[in-house]
Amino acid sequence: MDVLYSTNPSEIPTLDAAALRSRFLVDDLFIDGQVRAVYSHQDRVVLAGATPAGGPLPLPTFPELRSDTFFERREGGIINVGGAGTVTVDGETYALKHGSCLYVGRGAREVVFTSDGEDAARFYIFSAPAHTAFPTTLVEAGNGTVRELGDAETSNRRTLNQYIHENGVKSCQIVMGVTTLHTGSMWNTMPAHTHDRRMEAYLYFDLPEDARVVHLMGEPEETRHLMVGNQTAVISPSWSIHSGVGSASYSFVWAMAGENQSFDDMDAVAITELR
Ligand SMILES: O=C[C@H](O)[C@@H](O)CC(=O)C(=O)O
Ligand SMILES: [Zn+2]
C-alpha cells in the first residue's frame, strides 16, 4: 500500500509536473490478479483497485491499517469500471455490471471479487473511516438520483448519478456517484468549485486509451493541470478545484469524504476568476 501525505497549497508553485503527479495522481490501481491500494492522508481515504483475473480475488487488509480486516473500522463504495463481475460480502453475492455501485458497511469481514468472463472486472474502491455500520447495498448502474447538468453549447452536457448520498444509500462519510459526458461534450464540473469541508477523488474511465483529460487542480487563484489517462484517479484536497476537459468524452467516478455530506455545499468559481 502506498501512502500519500497531505500537501499544503503553498507547495503547489514549487512542484514540477512529475512532483504534482506523484502527490495527486494514482495511475496503477488496475493490474490483473491484484488488489492495489493507496492510503491518502486527505481525510484518511483509501483508494483501491481490484482486478480479478484467472480466479476469485479476496480483499486483503494492509499493515498500515493495523486491522484484522479491511473494513474493521471503515466503509467503502465500490464501482465496477471494467467487465461484469461479482462482489461477495460475508457470503452474500452481488452482481455488478459496468458502472454499478456497491456500498460496503463497517464490519464486513470477507470480501471476494470475481470476473464473469474474459473481460476482467475492475472494481474501484473508495474507503473512509466509519463510526457505525450501515447496510451493504447495491445500486445498479443508472439507478441513482439522476441530475442532468450543463449544455451542448458549452460542451458540458452530462448526466450525474448520485449513488451513496444523503437521499440515497446511507453512509457515515462517503458521498459517491458517476458522471457521464454526453457525446460531443468534453467539460466536467465547469464552473469549477471547492468544498472546504470535503476532499474528493475523481477516477476517469471509459476514456479511449489514446485520449487524455486535462484536469485542473490547485487553489482557484493558482491553478495547475494534470494530463490524465483512462482509469486514473486524481486526489483533490479540500482547497483544490477539480474540473477537466477531455480530448474525447468519458465518464468519471467522483467520491468525497470529510466534515459533511451536503452535495450542494460547494463554492463555485467563475472561469474568469481562475488564475
Ligand atoms: O462535488 C461534486 C463533484 O465535484 C462532482 O459531483 C461534480 C460532477 O460530477 C460534475 O459536475 O460533473
Ligand atoms: Zn466537488
Image (spheres, grey):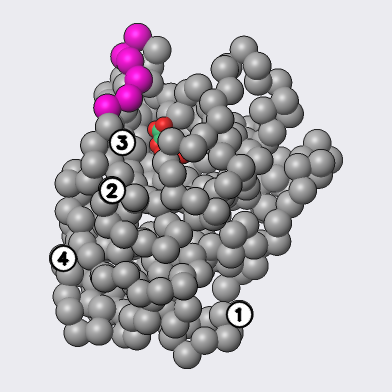
- Dot 1: few (<14), some (14–19), or many (≥20) neighbours within 10 Å? few
SS type, badge 4? strand
Residue 248 visible, this angle: yes
Would you name the residue on which mark 4 appears?
A: 95
Q: Which residue is at 56% across, 39% downward? A: 195
Q: As shown in the figure, which amino acid type bears the numbered disc 2?
A: Asn
Q: CA distance from mark 1 to mark 2?
A: 33 Å
Q: Secondary structure at mark 3?
A: strand
Some atom of ligand 1 lies within 8 Å of the CB belonging to the residue at label 3: yes
Instruction: Work out whether mark 1 precedes mark 3 in sequence or the reverse, and give the earlier one.
Output: 1
Query: Which residue in the protein does label 3 denote?
Result: 160
Can you tell me whether the CB of the residue at mark 4 lies under 8 Å from the nearest atom of ligand 1? Answer: no
Q: CA distance from mark 1 to mark 4?
A: 30 Å
Whether residue 54 is in magenta: the answer is no
Q: Residue at x 58, y 47 (%)?
A: 197
Tell me the mark number nearer the camera, choosing from 2 and 3: 2
Which residue is drawn at the image coordinates 53% and 81% (left, top)? 62
Dot 2 beta carbon under 8 Å from ligand 1: no
Q: Which residues are magenta?
A: 148-153
> Given this view, does label 4 or label 3 mark the residue nearer the observer?
3
Q: Identify which amino acid the numbered label 1 is placed on.
A: Glu
- Mark 2 element type: loop
Q: Nearer the viewer, mark 4 or mark 2?
A: 2
